[in-house]
Amino acid sequence: MKLYPSGCLVCGQDLVYLAQNEPQTCVYCGQNFEASCRCLAGHYVCDACHSLDSNEVIEQFCIQTDSTDPMAMAVTLMSHPALHMHGPEHHFLVPAVLLAAYYNQRQPEEKAAKIRQARKRAEKVLGGFCGFYGSCGAGVGAGIFISLVTNATPLSKLEWKLSNRMTAECLLTIAEHGGPRCCKRDTYLAVQTAQSFLKDHFDTSIGTDEPIRCRFSAFNKECLQQECPFFERI
């Protein structure tokens, strides 16, 4: 996926304007509308979702989706113009897509409350946390995810251990790829690491192992390009 300056927010294809309203379902909020516009691929984004801020987009999308693929969700969300190339919205994006995938496989009725709690926690992780505090917010977001699925508290034993270990493994992986920061690269790494962590410690699989090819590099002047495992080589 990439950012599209015109056309469909999701895929970039041209918009189609219909002679009369037809039933449409918004890609982001999942609500049904009567509308006269969609893209050639059939995607529709309602006016409200066009104008939402980043964390609102993430929350609404992750609550309404039935997807069990956190990486696919992350890519779809990062194509929305409210989500910038870099920014603290990625600190919420990581736990939100992981929680959505996890609970969609198990207890969907718990998902919305967990995602809203993740937002409250993630919004306390400031922009620039990676460089100024030595803790990338994407990695912290993965720790928030494990904390919420295990109901960890500061007085927990195994749950406390798992939450901190999740963050530690993400931060180590992110650090090994070096700086400068890239919120897209770090999001991919955090989600991938969380998927492996769930297999190893929870005997749980979410998402797929399909390779990621990032197409955001043109919008990132600090892109590592060939040194990034997700760089799309043309």
Image (tube, rainbow, N blue to C red):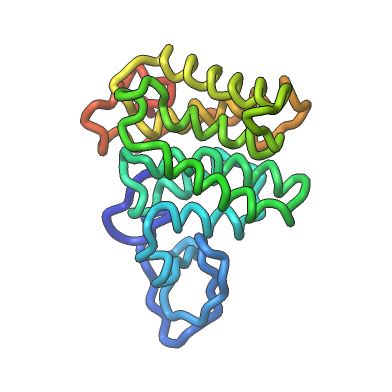
- Camera-side residue of 187 and 89: 89
Q: Is residue 198 above or below residue 23?
A: above
Quadrant in which the C terminus appears = top left
User: Foreground: 53 or 114?
Assistant: 114
| Location of residue 125 in the rendering, given as x and y in whole percent from the top left corner | 41, 37
Q: Residue at x 63, y 55 (%)?
A: 112
Give the residue at x 35% y 23%.
133
| Above or below 15: residue 17 | below
Residue 199 appears anywhere in the view: no
Looking at the rendered image, the quarter that the N terminus falls into is top left
Residue drawn at (47%, 41%) of the image: 122
- Foreground: 118 or 208? 118
How many numbered dots are placed on residues in this image?
0
165 lies left or right of 170: right
Return the residue nearer the eye: 125 or 154. 154
Q: Residue at x 33, y 40 (%)?
A: 87
Q: Position of residue 143 (x, y in %)?
A: 57, 30
- Residue 90 in the image: state x and y as whole percent: 42, 40
Q: Residue 41 location in percent, x, y?
A: 48, 61
Residue 25 visible, this orientation: yes
